[in-house]
Amino acid sequence: MADMISIGGVRIERTAALAPMASVADRAYRLMCKRFGASYLVSEMISAKGLVYGDKKTAELCRIFEEERPMALQLFGSEPEYMARAVDMLAKYEPDIIDINMGCPVPKVVQTGSGSALMKTPETAFLVTEAAVKHAPCPVTVKIRAGWDAESINAPELAKRLEQAGAAAIAVHGRTRSQYYSGKADREVIRRVKQAVSCPVIGNGDINSAEDCKAMYEQTGCDLVMIGRGSYGRPWIFREAARYLETGELPAPPTLEERMQIMLEHGRLAASFKGETQAMKEMRHNVAWYVKGLPGAAKIRGESGSLCTLADLERIAESVVNSQNNA
């Protein structure tokens, strides 16, 4: 049995959680990771303003399946009054946790003063968090970056302010906004955040293996590790991390046939939620991730660009297995 941590009374296995990833970690993706042992899930980003103004697409992001729990709904926004109203509206979805995004580096989010732009305005970040905490029916957490750029690494100081505002945990991606996803995540910054606050700290960035997961725990002292891009096409990374943390041994990786069956399960799940046409359009990048590193991967990626039906997906899976068997 894995160790547990508590975030405002919500108990989470101390193995590996799935990071929030807009346009990637949708419900089918989350459920695949959960089935392989992700201990905690976070929704795609939900616009506080979009929710308040009744956007239907935004509302759809708020639904939680029981199988996904414990799960957080993640809001982004820079105006305390909208954040408070959005938090009120989330109550009916019964999230285990509400998370505030202060780490997204994407220009269209940053230009509104939201996401990682809040790293530059600590007082606004405090007020946004405080407003959410006052209205939330559950614990509120915040996800930040190391800082805006290399000259303004302020995660430890900001984390202290957010804890004062009532944040029940702080997740830290060890890169600055200026880095986006380039370079290396700085684990030292995460360690300093852990030293600066008394609430749980979640470490995120460059977790591409079970060994990386263990190293993040050991090098930063963080309370939970969060895996993002390391799960692309590899939902079984959560199973590997849990086993490695418990025993020091890695389970055997999936065989090629198993890998393709997992991809098909993912595609069928996506189709059940979004309809076949939309799901297959969105599965194209997932297929590229599932076949990464395989012989002929470039050719398969090309074929996946015209993926339209589940039958197409089944043909790709079959051809991958056949080409390996005939090699």
Image (tube, rainbow, N blue to C red):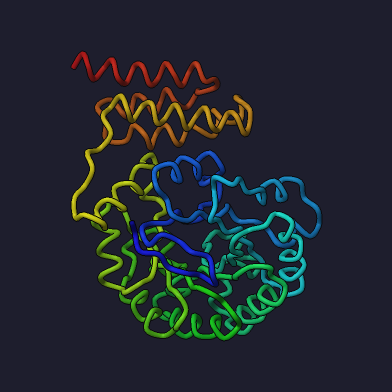
Looking at the picture, does residue 177 appear above or below residue 18? below
Tell me what residue is drawn at x 57 percent, y 86 percent: 164
In the image, residue 228 lies at what x, y percent? 42, 53
Q: Quadrant of the N terminus?
A: bottom left
Q: How many marks?
A: 0
Tell me what residue is drawn at x 44 percent, y 26 percent: 264
Looking at the picture, does residue 137 appear above or below residue 244? below
Give the farthest residue toward the right.
Answer: 53
Q: Is residue 318 left or right of residue 117?
A: left
Tell me what residue is drawn at x 50 percent, y 32 percent: 283
Q: Is residue 93 left or right of residue 321?
A: right
- Quarter of the image for residue 136 reads bottom right
Q: Is residue 217 left or right of residue 200?
A: left
In the image, residue 305 lies at what x, y percent? 47, 27
In the image, residue 16 lies at what x, y percent? 38, 57
Tell me what residue is drawn at x 23 percent, y 56 percent: 211
In the image, residue 218 lies at what x, y percent? 25, 70
- Quarter of the image for residue 99 reads bottom right
The one of 270 and 247 positioned closer to us in this rendering: 247
Looking at the picture, does residue 12 appear above or below residue 147? above
Q: Quadrant of the C terminus?
A: top left
Give the farthest residue toward the front.
Answer: 1
